[in-house]
Amino acid sequence: MQRILSSQLPAHVGATVRLAGWVHRRRLLKSVAFLVLRDGGGLAQVVVTAPAVRAQVEALTEETVVEVVGTVVANPAAPAGVEVVEPTVRPLGPPAVPPPFDLYRPVLTAGLSTQLDHAPLALRHPSRSAALRISAAAVSGFRATLDGQGFVEVHTPKVVASSTESGANVFALDWFGRPAYLAQSPQFYKQLMVGVFERVYEVGPVFRAEPHDTARHLAQYTSLDVELGFVADHRDVMAVLRDTLAGMVATVADRADGALATLGVTVPEVPAEIPAVHFTEALTIAGAPPSEPDLAPAHERALGEWALREHGSDFLFVTGYPMAKRPFYTHPDPARPAYSNGFDLLFRGVELVTGGQRLHRHADYLAALAARGEPVEPYAGYVDAFRHGMPPHGGFAIGLERFVARLTGAANVREVTAFPRDLHRLTP
């Protein structure tokens, strides 16, 4: 008999089926016992009345892996309106050591630090696994949307010879006796691949040796990177980003509807045109001094509230960041050279995406590096490619964990990360 998942039970009413999964919970009443089985499809209620089977169930511990064979009957009070009766129960392994917290309770009551210490177990809780299902659906929507627009997925090195962003916040390592670094982003490589495919994207880890200890930062996170050629300016990039977000949200709604229901989450609407404000206007809206070179988290929150109040939008573009706060490869605004053709996208008052138009002329790269007092040599392999003809191009990067945290309302990005790596955590 082929195994089915708990989610498939409603299609088998009246039939004998085989389930397998974990003992999620046991409820032992006087005349009947209930075994709640958890598998990859959800939860199934198994009704036990036979004394011999009841004795087996009483001896089981939560999280023991078992096989159940029984008959499916309709019961509106059971999960999905069905339950399994007249079962046989067979352990598929030794009795499990009970976890240090109750996984059967609706809310995982253990503190976040305890959850992370015992991540392989905490992730079994429906609320934690639901966030990861949403994450998987978001990546699927990201890929599908860009595939539909002629993008090619690429895979770039995560060990590099120099830092990507001209900064010191990199993880150094020994590469066969030579210094090397974990990549801060695939920025240089995805730009170079525009010269091959015109439109590219990548899903992969990036590493930031920044000593942040906040609810929104990780030292390793998943970056959804996009780069496209033959753009007029950053607004073409923003249009692709808008469509990409809409595709991600739609796929989450379609493929992770059960996970959304578990968390009580409703996906946001991505406006046909996301509202946008220039950086100088954003400072005014946020009540910040006009001399501020960047937006602080409090400014982002104020802007998010303004976008929701004035435009009914959970999303807001802030364009024209000062060139002084953007990487050397950023294209300046031709009309206002002190400001860039770069942007951030705020999602519910938190920066989610950074992007913009890039320089594409070799001479401009030499001038940009010289203006910042940077030598060309560390970037020679990158900069040299622009001698051989590169189109006007731009791109963006979405932080996956931050996107899922904002979507689900998680207070800490670690709540939606399977095995987070930060300033303090390298295990499990």
Image: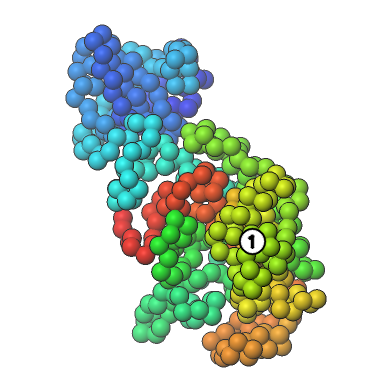
Tell me what residue is drawn at x 52 percent, y 54 percent: 402
Q: Count numbered badges in the picture.
A: 1
- Give the x, y percent position of residue 204: 51, 61
Quadrant where the C terminus sits is bottom left
- Give the x, y percent position of residue 70: 36, 17
Quadrant where the N terminus sits is top left
Identity of the amino acid at label 1?
Gly
Tell me what residue is drawn at x 63 percent, y 90 percent: 370
> Is any part of residue 270 visible from this angle?
no
Colour option used? rainbow
- Give the x, y percent position of residue 361: 73, 82
Tell me what residue is drawn at x 28 percent, y 20 percent: 27
Would residue 136 be found to the left or right of residue 23 on screen? right
| Depth check, front residue: 87 or 398 | 398
| Depth check, front residue: 88 or 401 | 401
- Give the x, y percent position of residue 187: 59, 71
* Residue 60: quadrant of the picture: top left
Q: Which residue is mark 1?
A: 287
| Depth check, front residue: 105 or 200 | 105
> Is any part of residue 73 visible from this angle?
yes
Tell me what residue is drawn at x 20 percent, y 35 percent: 94
Would residue 254 be found to the left or right of residue 67 on screen? right
| Depth check, front residue: 240 or 330 | 330
